[in-house]
Structure formats: C-alpha cells, structure tokens
Amino acid sequence: MKRWKKCCQQTRFWIKARVMSRKVGIAILLVAFAQFVVPMLPAIGIGEPIGARGDVAVRPPELPPGPFFSIWSLIFLSYTIFAVLSLWKPGYLEHRLAMPLLFAGIGNLVWMVSAQSLANQYADLVLLIPILAFSWLAARRLHRMGGFDGTLARLNACMLTGLFSGWITAALSISLAATWREAAGLAPSDHVWVSLWIALLSAGLLAWVFASRVSASLFYFAALGWGIAGIAVNNWYLTDMHWLSAAAALFGLYILWRRLRYGARPSFE
C-alpha cells in the first residue's frame, strides 16, 4: 500500500513537472517572438528607435556604431531555437536554463520598451542589472552541467548564454559611463577620457568576475570583445579621437589575451 501511494505521488509529480515545463516553454517562445516585434514598434508610431538616440551631432566616446548592435539578431535567433527545443524536446538542459533565460528575456523586453518610450538613462541602467543577473545565472548553470557536450542543442545553449551574458556586460558598462555623464550634467564631448575609462574598466572588472565566478564561456568574451571593438571603431571613424580608439582597442585585446592565456577558473563554493 505504501509503495502504491509513493508510486502515485511520483506519477503526479512527473505530470505536474511536464505541465509546468510546457507552460514555461510556451512563455519562452512568446518572449522570443516579442523580442523580434518590440524593436519594430516605433515603425507604427510607438516610441522612438533606440538607435536614434545615438544619432547625434556629437557622439559619446563609449557608444558603438549601429552595425555592432546586429549581434542582437544572433542572440534572438539562438533564443528562439532554445524556445522551440524547450517545447519540442525538453530535457535536463532546457529544464535547468528555462527560468533564468525566461526572466532575462522578459527583462530585455521591459528594457527595450523603456528605452524606446522613456529614454531615461537611470531607468536604462537599473533595468540592465536583472538582465545581467539572470543571463549570468543561465551561463553558470550551463557551465556546471559541463558546457558543450557535442550536441547541437548544447552548442546553441552555449552560444545563447555566452553571447547574451557578454553583450549585456558591454551594455551595462556603456550605460554606467552614460549615467555618470548624465548625473554630472556633462555633454558627450566633456571629459571623454573619464567616460571611456568608466566603460572599459567596468567591462574589465565584470569580465574578471564572470571568468572567476560564473563560467569559462568563450562566447562571452567574443560578445564583450565585439562591444569593445565597437567603441574603438566609434572613436576612430566617428569621433576622430584616435587616442581613445587606440586605448579601447588595446584594452579589449588585453582582456581577450588574458582570458586565452590564463583561462577561466570559476569557483562555486
């Protein structure tokens, strides 16, 4: 009799887990679809394109040119593939990563709507923090599961968590510089070296924390390096501040060299 009750309890638990997994999978798929739709809202008169905020006569030194933000397309595509797999063939991988990626995606939607509608620098900074926290949590869980295991599903998960975490790190670092300038009441051309180093040092510190406490993902450093390369290109071609461009390029190369030379040793205890 006790065995029968235990078997019934396990069966009910399994059914509830499957139902919950399916609900979460549907939610992730809806978020994936919304991430493609929300950036198009300004086309129908809802808000202003985020890129338009950077289209000014005097550009800040820490803002990459528009083409560098195309990395979002790759992140959104990878997110959508993960969402489809979560519904079609959910496994331990999808179960462990679903919730942090769901909350990271929701946070990203809120950030995009806020940036397009409010254009408030303080709100932008605050909203980026939970996105970074949840994307880093997903990367940490994946690392503890062993990272890439040779399957396409795991490769997509590695790419998604790494690129998402790395690009949000770049976005938060850039936002910190812009927030400092906003709080100080400065124009984009004021104290450009200070703005640049706030962004670069923030990126370097976050990269160290990620490699030493979160994950050994190389995709993370590819995304962060892409963001810093955008800063270098911005200052070389658009602001004509070549010394700032050289500093950004050298700092970005140093971060990549240190990761490749010394590796990553995430600690979880």
Image: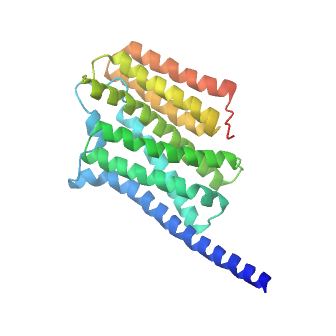
Q: Tell me the quarter of the picture where residue 16 sits.
A: bottom right
In the visual, does 262 lie left or right of 133?
right
State left or right for residue 156 relative to residue 61: right
The correct choice, above or below, for 241 with respect to 262 in the image is above
Q: Position of residue 86 (x, y in %)?
A: 57, 63
Quadrant the N terminus occupies: bottom right
Closer-to-camera residue (15/45): 15
Q: Is residue 147 visible?
A: no
* Furthest residue in direction top, as rendered: 243
Q: Quadrant of the C terminus?
A: top right
Q: How many marks?
A: 0
Q: Is residue 50 visible?
A: yes
Going by the image, does 43 lie left or right of 69? left
In this rendering, would 21 be left or right of 1? left
Name the residue: 30% across, 44% down.
115
Residue drawn at x 30%, y 52% is 40
Q: Residue 262: percent from the left, percent from the top? A: 68, 25
Residue 208 x %, y %: 58, 29
Choose top left, top right, bottom left or bottom right for residue 88.
bottom right
Q: Residue at x 66, y 74 (%)?
A: 14
Picture residue at 52% right of the left edge, 41% below the top:
165
Residue 134 position within the rendered picture, expressed as x and y whole percent measured from the top left: 51, 48
Residue 85, above or below 77? below
| Residue found at the far front of this picture | 2
